[in-house]
Image (spheres, coloured by chain):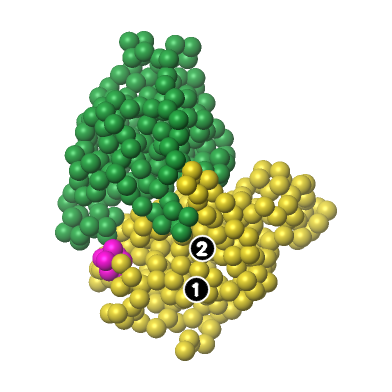
Amino acid sequence: MIASPVIESPLCPETAVYEKTVLAGEGWIHRIAAGQVFRIVDLEGNQAVDTLFYNADDTSERYSAQDTIVAQRNIYLTTGTTLMSNLRRPMLTITADTCGRHDTLGGACAQESNQVRYAIEKRHMHACRNSFLLAIADPKWNLTKRDVASNINFFMNVPVTPEGRLTFEDGISNPMKYVEMRAEMDVIAVISNCPQLNNPCNGYNPTPIQVLIWNAGA
Amino acid sequence: MSSPALWEDTIQPGSSWSLILRRGRELRLEDLDGGANVAAVFYNFDCPVERYNIDTLKAQHAAHLTKRLVLYSDMGRILCSITEDSCGWHDPLGGHNDAAAVLAKYGPSSYQQERNAWHRNTRDNFLTELSRYGLGIRDLPPNVNFFSKIVVGDTGAMEFVPRNSRPGDYVTLRAEMNLLVVLDTGQHPLDPNPLYDPKPVKFAVREAAPVAPDDPCRLSRPENARGFINTERYFL
């Protein structure tokens, strides 16, 4: 396993035009304009941040995991990765990353997948897909369950082996690690700050994250 | 012994097909010439907002598909099980080509000039098939690429492995729900072959043997045993 180099951002939190702390288990939805810079901070470390993006003007265009990894011929996301839409257009570009690597194959936890992965009796447990569905519930976003595509898991470590195994490893993120990206089009970002308690993706202790936005040229 | 085929046909190179595969029936795909690719997406035909999901990978800790593994929906249920596989590796990562990718890779082509030998692309074929069922681009999940192999290296790099599938190789999918299956024989996006050279694929639909308590797909992982429970409860 080879980690990508750490790339710091020159932007200071003091100059951000938007800042919010998102607690574990909560959803967040927000419009980000083309040219704005969006940062997610893993405040306490080892926190999976399940994330979707949509073209704000036409939500049938959305982040596509397969199109993103095929375009760069690499399954890991880090500085320099262009997050591609299902129409093969750049949505955002990762411009800084102090974690080194992020996943887009692990999907989002759901009550039903928790049943499959852990126990039938776990259906009651809170899961990312519920946060996604609640975040998009307002009809103004023009999104429904059919639009919940394969997501990004920022700060999550899901290596694939040459033998074709998908493994879930302990996180490689630490407190205050962040990933930052520039919007290449007006996008709607949807986040579920993962509530998963059944596996090490959050170190069995889901914790808050911070989201920040800077205007273009900040 | 397998039962007689209820229906057999061949998907021509670069062409698509969609079909309803009832729970308890199986679909066998056969690579007639070797080197085929079959891009495929799956839906619960009775409620298509339930569809193939990348949970398939994490539930089985697998970045490739083969015998004894299953394909999951987003609802924790098993759409279909892989009951036979002579090939050994099917790709769930590599996506599919669109018109721009086919043009860039294989050059210009038009129906006007070439009639049915023109270059088609999987995206347009998928959208055309999906529209027959009232579905569209919002409904297109990640696809599986049967008969293709992508290996991921230590740095995450994706590499296409040529000649993964030989002439006569086959894979059999047993439907565990009533499925809408959409298939396309367009080339894999990471296939380095510079020529437009998709391959024909034969398919056959049969009655499947009942799923036994000791079914290999059910027993392959405890996750799959629970997936079968979820699926069986859906049909109570």
On the rendered image, what quadrant is the C terminus of chain A found in?
A: top left
Q: Is residue A16 left or right of residue B7?
A: left
In depth, the one of A216 and A1 nearer the eye is A1
Amino acid beneath label 2: His
* Residue name at image x 33 percent, y 27 percent: A177
Image vertical order of residue B3 relative to residue A66, above or below: below
The residue labelled by disc 1 is B85
Q: Which chain is yellow?
A: B
- Kindly identify which chain the residue marked by label 2 belongs to: B
Residue B12 in the image, given as x and y percentages of width and height: 67, 67
* Residue name at image x 53 percent, y 83 percent: B5
- Callout 2: SS: loop
Q: Is residue A97 left or right of residue B143?
A: left
Image vertical order of residue A54 relative to residue B101, above or below: above
Image vertical order of residue A95 relative to residue B15, above or below: above
* Residue name at image x 81 percent, y 56 percent: B114
Residue A30 in the image, given as x and y percentages of width and height: 36, 27
Residue furthest toward the front? Answer: A2
Q: Say which quarter of the image contains residue B87.
A: bottom right
Q: Identify the colour of chain A in the image.
A: green
* Residue B127 appears in the figure: no
Magenta residue span: B222-228
Image vertical order of residue B31 relative to residue A88, above or below: below
Q: Which mark is residue B90?
A: 2
Mark 1, other Cα within 10 Å: few <14 / some 14–19 / many ≥20: many
Numbered disc total: 2
* Residue name at image x 76 percent, y 60 percent: B117
CA gap, disc 1 and disc 2 = 9 Å
